[in-house]
Image (cartoon, helix red, strand yellow):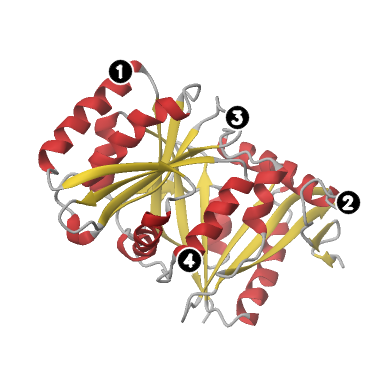
Amino acid sequence: MSIPLTDTATLHPLALPARADAADAGEFRELSRVRNDVYRSLTGRTEQDLAPEALLPLLRSRAERTTVVWALRVDGEMVGRAVVDIPHEDGSRVAIASVEIHPRVWGRGIGSAIVPHIEAVAREHGRSVIQNWTEQQASSGPRIDARTGFGSVPDDHVARFLRRQGFTLEQVYRVSRLDLTPDAVDRARRLLNEARRFSTDYRVLQWMIPTPAEHLDGYAWLKSRMSTDAPSADLETDEESWDAARLTAAEDRIAEMRQTMQVTVAQHIGTGELAAFTEIGIGPDPSATTHQHDTLVLREHRGNRLGQLVKCAALLSWADAAPASRDVITYNAEENRPMLSINEAMGFAPIAYEGAWKKDLS
């Protein structure tokens, strides 16, 4: 049933198909195309493109979260979407929401008409906080500083919309790119050798997912700590509970998306504990941009150059896994100076910034 928003705009709850190529998947495939168009319009880049087969696993509800998806239409034409994720972690107060509308229909009050429906879903699930992550195009105009004191985003249409809706800018992520040139490989090799001199109590282990059985529990623990040890400013951060079953289900989704992912860890030799990790992956196009995903060093193992160790080891071995990929992109909190310093030493350069926004419904 369509939900009227304005004289011309309607919101349509989207029932996800069983498969992206199913007979009833037409509207979902259209949503996938529109999603990519909106991302390209907002960022000016294409590395966030996802085929319908890759998008579908990301939008399904799962054991650890409920996902609600709407398609937005103006005069019958699909021009955007809205998504709400409800995490199922114990004690969670947060809903994670996004409103993605093609810029050519901005300024008509459509986004403002969608927000009450997002808030209704959040309240229906007992949530009192909505959070949103939005990347904005570079601008030389006025800027808004994050409440952390680290980083800023343009005070543009996107920021003004979020502020009118009661959101505050809590944190800024730097989007960085590294061109995979011979010089970049040489730098990574030098930095790896340097890190090894500081991390003699650790060994590097690597695998392509699925994770070997002997490392499932250790890697799941690292993923749990990602939710507590990474910088999160004053955002509501649920402590995620990962075990071997949740990790296996996540890796099954990655395989369904036809993505290749390599995991690199630092293992403490004396105890066998996995102390740091980084993930690097690519979609079905072997010449596309590589994505550096989660990277973390456990607090109790910091000060041993383990971030530098795993990131450089991952980059050097990635050339064998995806030799046609020519660049890597990664996201880091602006206050995460240790990780940004590693990136900068490796040759990563900033290309954009993403704001993390928060609204208190209480």
Q: Please name the amino acid that badge 1 sits on.
A: Asp
Q: Secondary structure at mark 4?
A: strand
Q: Is residue 228 above or below residue 146?
A: below
Give the CA distance from mark 4 to mark 3.
35 Å
The residue wearing badge 4 is 358
Q: Return the residue nearer the eye: 145 or 355.
A: 355
Which residue: 18% across, 54% down?
Answer: 302
Q: Nearer the viewer, mark 3 or mark 2?
A: 3
- Local crowd size for mark 4, using a 10 Å CA cut-off: few (<14), some (14–19), many (≥20): many
Q: Nearer the viewer, mark 1 or mark 4?
A: 1
The residue wearing badge 2 is 76
As drawn, the label of residue 160 is: none
Q: Secondary structure at mark 3?
A: loop
Q: Secondary structure at mark 1?
A: helix
The reply to whether discs 2 and 1 touch (Cβ–Cβ < 8 Å) is: no
Give the CA distance from mark 3 to mark 1.
24 Å
Residue 161 visible here: yes
The percent position of residue 216, horizontal first and vertical second, equals: 41, 58
Q: Return the residue nearer the eye: 346 or 244.
A: 244
Left or right of residue 6: residue 153 = left
Q: Return the residue nearer the eye: 21 or 106.
A: 21
The percent position of residue 60, horizontal first and vertical second, equals: 67, 61
Compare marks 2 and 1 and give the one earlier in the sequence. 2
Q: Is residue 278 above or below residue 221?
A: above
As drawn, the label of residue 183 is: 1
Q: Nearer the viewer, mark 3 or mark 1?
A: 3
The residue wearing badge 3 is 285
Q: Is residue 53 above or below residue 360?
A: above
